[in-house]
């Protein structure tokens, strides 16, 4: 029998408030840090209802980076959880060294499993899920993948914000017609994802900043890194010379611009792209050079919901010129992107993920217990 250490959430995942979800995360983290929740002890995190099963969390997976040293593969292993479907409950096995960020990302797993458990009696099966920025090319459930696009689940920011509830309200309250917004093309972000490249000048984010701050076109762009963390000295010097490194700005600055840009970081930009769709201005999405996608990309139509730009930015000038000149086309893209993003509420996306879990269970990646 499990030892009940914290108060679990109720079984209606689409009704969880942001306060409740973060409360659960903080309770788990505190219980781990104060010793109240030792390793290899299961506790209920989501209560059962009717014929459904509870979801229980247990910290049992070995910390590969601590035991074997840091490698990318060990790092990916530490970010994974194993999900066991048993008769009495669904067990989520986390790494023994899971930190607050990873615990917060577990909430997505709890939500989709709760919904699934209420409708599916499957038992005796286990599957893996990555809680990292990507799946590391492993064939498992994940938030972003460049290969396994049939195994994607909603990212934690979508879940923990209740599909960006506060941001949706802000956008409505501060709405400005696109024709009256700053006419420049906007992007602000961190120099994340540099570790993917042997030469940081090959980074799509670095290339975007160099392109946008070229004196021949810089008047039409507000595109900069928000900091220089992790940049090699030569890359930093080159970007500073062209005013390509600025200060952090509020994420809702995107509401002030007639055109927004999306580009990969470590993997897909998660919050960045979704919020830009919500603000109703056309998003110029630079094609992922590594093929990263998220769970809802299968519903996006290029040049209908967003403007697609080649991965090497070779057609950026032509596309940006066309959107600037044809404001009706630009408006149509922005409106279509916003309408689609608005349709993604928490309930519908949790239900959509049922099919993803069913696929994972029936695929070769599942393990018999």
Image: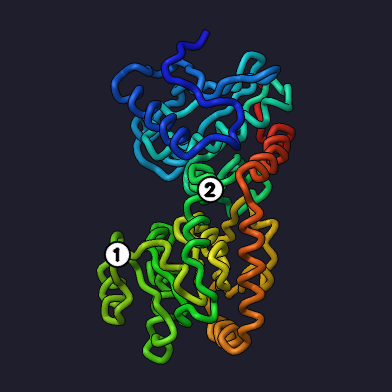
- Where's residue 228, x and y in %? 28, 65
- Where's residue 4, x and y in %? 46, 14
The mark closer to the camera, 2 or 1, is 2
The answer to whether residue 267 is visible is: no
- Residue 17 lies, with reference to residue 301, above or below; the image says above
**Splitting the image into 4 quarters, where does residue 211 fall?**
bottom left
The answer to whether residue 110 is visible is: yes
Q: Which residue is tagged 2?
A: 158
**Splitting the image into 4 quarters, where does residue 62 fall?**
top left
- Residue 50 lies, with reference to residue 70, above or below; the image says above
Residue appearing at x 45%, y 80% in the figure: 182
Q: Distance between the residues labelled 2 and 1?
A: 25 Å
SS at mark 1 in the image: loop
Q: Which residue is tagged 1?
A: 227
Mark positioned earlier in the residue sequence (2 or 1):
2
Residue 126's tag is none
SS at mark 2 in the image: helix
Residue appearing at x 47%, y 44% in the figure: 132
């Amino acid at each position: 029998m499990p030892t009940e250490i914290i108060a679990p959430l109720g079984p209606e995942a689409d009704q969880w408030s942001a306060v409740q979800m973060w409360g659960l995360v903080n309770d788990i983290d505190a219980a781990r840090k104060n010793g109240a929740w030792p390793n290899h002890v299961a506790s209920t995190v989501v209560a059962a209802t009717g014929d459904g099963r509870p979801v229980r969390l247990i910290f049992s997976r070995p910390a590969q980076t601590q035991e074997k040293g840091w490698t990318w593969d060990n790092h990916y292993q530490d970010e994974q959880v194993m999900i066991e479907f048993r008769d009495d409950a669904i067990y989520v096995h986390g790494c023994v060294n899971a930190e607050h960020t990873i615990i917060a990302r577990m909430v997505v797993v709890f939500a989709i499993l709760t919904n699934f458990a209420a409708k599916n009696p499957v038992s005796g099966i286990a599957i893996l899920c990555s809680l990292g920025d990507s799946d590391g090319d492993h064939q498992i459930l994940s938030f972003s993948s460049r290969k396994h696009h049939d195994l994607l689940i909603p990212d934690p920011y979508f879940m923990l914000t209740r599909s960006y509830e506060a941001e949706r309200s802000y956008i409505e309250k501060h709405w400005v017609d696109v024709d009256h917004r700053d006419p420049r093309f906007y992007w602000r972000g961190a120099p994340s994802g540099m570790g993917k490249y042997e030469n940081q000048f090959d980074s799509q984010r670095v290339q975007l900043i160099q392109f946008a701050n070229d004196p021949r076109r810089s008047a039409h762009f507000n595109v900069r890194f928000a900091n220089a963390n992790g940049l090699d000295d030569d890359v930093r010097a080159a970007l500073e010379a062209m005013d390509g490194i600025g200060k952090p700005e509020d994420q809702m600055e995107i509401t002030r611009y007639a055109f927004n840009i999306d580009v990969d970081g470590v993997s897909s930009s998660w919050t960045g792209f979704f919020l830009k769709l919500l603000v109703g201005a056309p998003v110029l999405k630079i094609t992922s050079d590594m093929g990263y996608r998220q769970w809802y990309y299968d519903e996006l139509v290029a040049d209908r919901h967003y403007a697609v730009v080649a991965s090497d930015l070779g057609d950026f000038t032509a596309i940006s010129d066309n959107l600037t000149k044809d404001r009706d086309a630009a408006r149509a893209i922005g409106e279509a992107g916003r309408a689609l993003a608005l349709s993604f509420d928490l309930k519908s996306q949790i239900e959509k993920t049922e099919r993803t879990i069913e696929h994972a269970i029936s695929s070769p990646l599942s393990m018999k217990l």
